[in-house]
Amino acid sequence: MWVSLLQNNNYIDTEIVPIKYDSIVLYLSVTVPFAHPSVIMKRSFLETNDIKYGISFYTNAEDYAMWCNLYGQNARFGNLNEFLFKYREFNQSLSKTNRKKIFKDRKDKLVHFLINIT
């Protein structure tokens, strides 16, 4: 879970994300179920499975592509049931300005994700 903040520190939204693995995988079929900068993972898992961030056909949805790739390598996921992260949103952030491109990349990756999940 995390809280979104505007530039002037006014609270604007609260994102509730799933806690249990099965729910996280289901959520992943739609969007990223993590506050990306709050994630802790084992470097050895990334190296063993040759997973690199930003080296993907999906240049606008890099986060989503990485999480789908991690799932494809049998990574285990979890979220804490506590508010531990404050996320500052900017109108000029890439996730806002490239929204259409991100949705297209995420949709394309989702098709591959759903094919591999069944």
Image (spheres, helix red, strand yellow):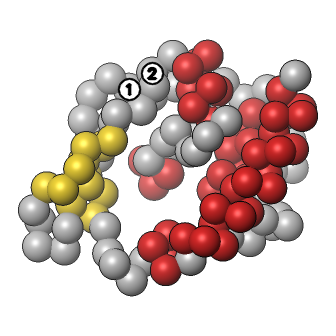
Residue 37 in the image: above or below residue 96: above
Type of amino acid under label 2: Ile
User: Which residue has dot 2 on it?
Assistant: 19
Which residue occupies 60% across, 71% down? 100
Q: Position of residue 94 (x, y in %)?
A: 50, 77
10 Å neighbourhood of mark 1: few (<14), some, or many (≥20)?
Answer: few
Tell me residue 10's x, y (percent): 10, 62
For numbered disc 2, what is the local secondary structure?
loop
Q: Is residue 46 visible?
A: no
Marks 2 and 1, the one that precedes in the sequence: 2
Identify the mark at residue 108; answer none if there is no mark.
none
Residue at the (66%, 52%) spot, across then down? 64
Residue 62 figure quarter: bottom right
Q: Position of residue 87 (x, y in %)?
A: 30, 57
The numbered mark at residue 80 is: 1
In which quadrant of the rendered image does the N terminus lie?
A: top left
Q: Nearer the viewer, residue 113 or 100?
A: 100
The relative height of residue 112 versus residue 86 in the rendered view (above or below) is above
Looking at the image, residue 71 sits to the left or right of residue 26; the answer is right
Identify the residue at image location x=25%, y=43%.
14
> Does residue 6 appear left or right of residue 105 in this picture?
left
Counting other residues with Cα less than 10 Å from the Cα at mark 2, is it few (<14), some (14-19), or many (20 or more)?
some
- Residue at the image point whose x is 63% and y is 66% from the top: 102
Q: Amino acid at mark 1?
A: Leu
Q: Are marks 2 and 1 in contact (CB under 8 Å)?
A: yes
What's the distance in space between the residues labelled 2 and 1, CA to CA?
Answer: 6 Å
Q: Nearer the viewer, mark 2 or mark 1?
A: 2
In the rendered structure, the answer to whether residue 45 lies left or right of residue 98 reads: right
